[in-house]
Image (cartoon, helix red, strand yellow):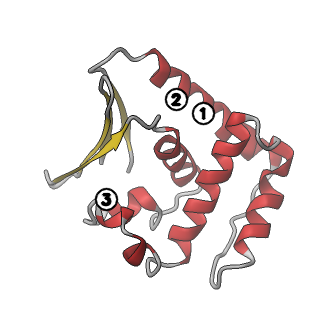
Amino acid sequence: MEIIITKGKNRNTLTCKRKDGTVTSFNLGPNIPNHDIAHYVVEKEFNLENGFYGKVKSGMTIEELSDKEIIKNLGSETWLSEIMARNLQSIGSGAAKIEQFIELINWEAQNIDGIKVPNMNLTDIEKMKLNFDQLCEKWNLIPENGELKLIFE
């Protein structure tokens, strides 16, 4: 699946093109797409097939995945993806330290039934943060109407 984040003047757009040719798109508004980038990084790193992009790849729309009523019933791996993406953003912004990532994931995951936290080590987290930082920097350099294209398989 191809993920395209388009930078607009006051609005950014997330578009996902599935291999079968179907497309789902969502207006992100003026928000910087760091959360969407964080999902991409953690889901690829840990092969989360039922995270946000895995759900889009399987046919759900981005709009459906933004609906709180639908989100509640998506399953433990989707929640794990959300927890990991949020905490990757935290270490990316400096709100948390790389060394705290695993502890934060385990702490949040214990409150949700069925979450199986993957084995992680500091090297994994450093690699993810580097990838996240590079993609965010690439986004920052994209001009208006430009696109950040990512492949999610």
Is 102 left or right of 67, judged from the image as shown?
right
Q: In the rendering, which numbered label is found on residue 135?
A: 2
CA distance separating discs 1 and 2 = 6 Å
Disc 1, disc 2: CB below 8 Å? yes
Tag 2's secondary structure?
A: helix
Q: In the rendering, which numbered label is found on residue 82?
A: none
CA distance separating discs 1 and 3 = 22 Å
Is 131 left or right of 48, judged from the image as shown?
right
Tag 3's secondary structure?
A: helix
Mark 1 residue type: Asn
Q: Residue at x 47, y 63 (%)?
A: 51
Is 107 left or right of 79, judged from the image as shown?
right
Q: Identify the image quadrant of residue 109.
A: bottom right
Residue at numbered disc 3: 57
Residue at numbered disc 1: 131
Is 11 left or right of 22, judged from the image as shown?
right
Mark 2 residue type: Leu
Q: Which x, y percent locates residue 128?
A: 65, 41
Disc 2, disc 3: CB below 8 Å? no
Q: Residue at x 39, y 77 (%)?
A: 69
Query: Viewer-proximal residue, 91 or 8?
Result: 8
Mark 3 residue type: Lys
CA distance separating discs 2 and 3 = 21 Å
